[in-house]
Amino acid sequence: MLSVTEVTVRYGSLTAVSDIDLAVADGEVVALLGPSGCGKSTLLRAIAGLEPPARGVVRWDDTDLAAVPVHRRGFGLVFQDGQLFPHRDVAGNVAFGLRMRHMPTADRRTRVAELLELVGLGGYEHRRVTELSGGEQQRVALARALAPRPRLLLLDEPLSALDRALREQLAMDLAGVLRVADATALVVTHDHDEAFTLADRVAVMRAGAVVQTGPPDEVWRRPADEDTARFLGCGTFLPAEVRDGVATCELGSVAVPWAAAGRVTLGLRPTALRLDEDGTVTGKLIRSVHRRDHVRLQVRLDDTDRLVDAVAGIAETPGDRVRLRLDPDGLAVVGAAP
């Protein structure tokens, strides 16, 4: 088990990471999620032993790792660019750590073949890594990191250099690989879809601190504060009253069975309002923009003159009158306790 206690990392007068407490249980995948510059990669580097903490302790089980060098920690590392050896073929890259451990040749070949099957690259042993696509290269980097059976896998934005469609597919594949391998892993990412796909728990970071930790569904539905909710896609915030699992606000009522009774703040993502001819929310369409799998609308509401985002399956004409309905899948209850 990894435990991080009050870890602080400074660069001169700049505090990049401040008093972080974090734990990763055996067999658990935890995502460090936050915007660029929030300190998540710095924290990962401190855990790996690449950055010395100014204070605090990184432990594996009951052992303080302060005096343990990077190559003795038993951690596997996967970075954004994979950092493969261009002069080695796929098998040579995957087997590198095994060679350093003097594993017998026959056992090494068996382990390489097993891992390449696991990451979907069976039969690629003799391919040059320079001939592989970006996604294939990251699969090789993952296989190489898993080869020595590390007790902890550290992944620093492993998919961010890939295009969106490939990133989504590889995130699902990676989630499957981590679970089949029963890996203990810490994943750094700025993409909440990626974090929620991969992780058993999510730790949201902002300005060098962890501001919320919990299962993906809990973090998504109950962000700790408005800044966290904005990072998770909420653009509109409305006061509401919850009774018997139903929230009532100026836009109507909607089921929120995860919310406790009382006064709350609702965070609305664009998907919280959907075009519906039977909807009770009315307004004038200001803008209609095509996205990859939906159309994003901007609507000026009749009753409040508020500008809100909404989604539709097809494009509409600016100036049209539209009807919208609240969709609970796009809502968050901000700052609510579980």
Image: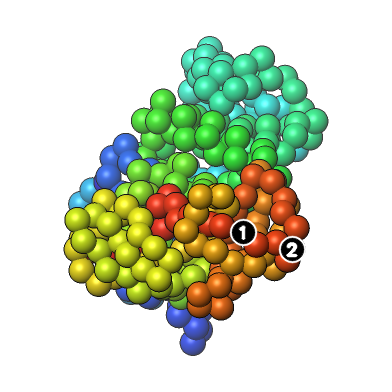
Badge 1 density bin: few <14, some 14–19, many ≥20, Cα 10 Å: many
Q: Amino acid at mark 2?
A: Pro
- The structure residue drawn at horizontal position 45% and vertical position 80%, both measured from the top left corner, is 15
Residue type (three-letter) at the residue carrying disc 1:
Val
Examine the rendering and report whether any part of residue 144 can be seen. Answer: no
Q: What's the residue at 69%, 46% (across, down)?
A: 314
Residue that label 1 marks: 322
Q: With 4 as the anchor, is 317 left or right in this view?
A: right
Q: Is residue 71 above or below residue 151?
A: below
Q: Percent position (x, y) of residue 280? A: 47, 58
Q: Is residue 77 above or below residue 211?
A: above
Between 267 and 274, the one nearer to me in the picture:
274
Q: Residue at x 62, y 17 (%)?
A: 122
Residue 254 visible in image: yes
Residue found 31% across the figure and 54% down from its top: 256
Q: Is the residue marked by circle 2 packed among few (<14), some (14-19), or many (20+) residues within 10 Å?
A: some
Using the rendered view, name the quadrant where residue 68 is placed: bottom left
Quarter the C terminus occupies: bottom left
Q: Residue furthest bottom?
A: 13
Q: Which residue is mark 2?
A: 318
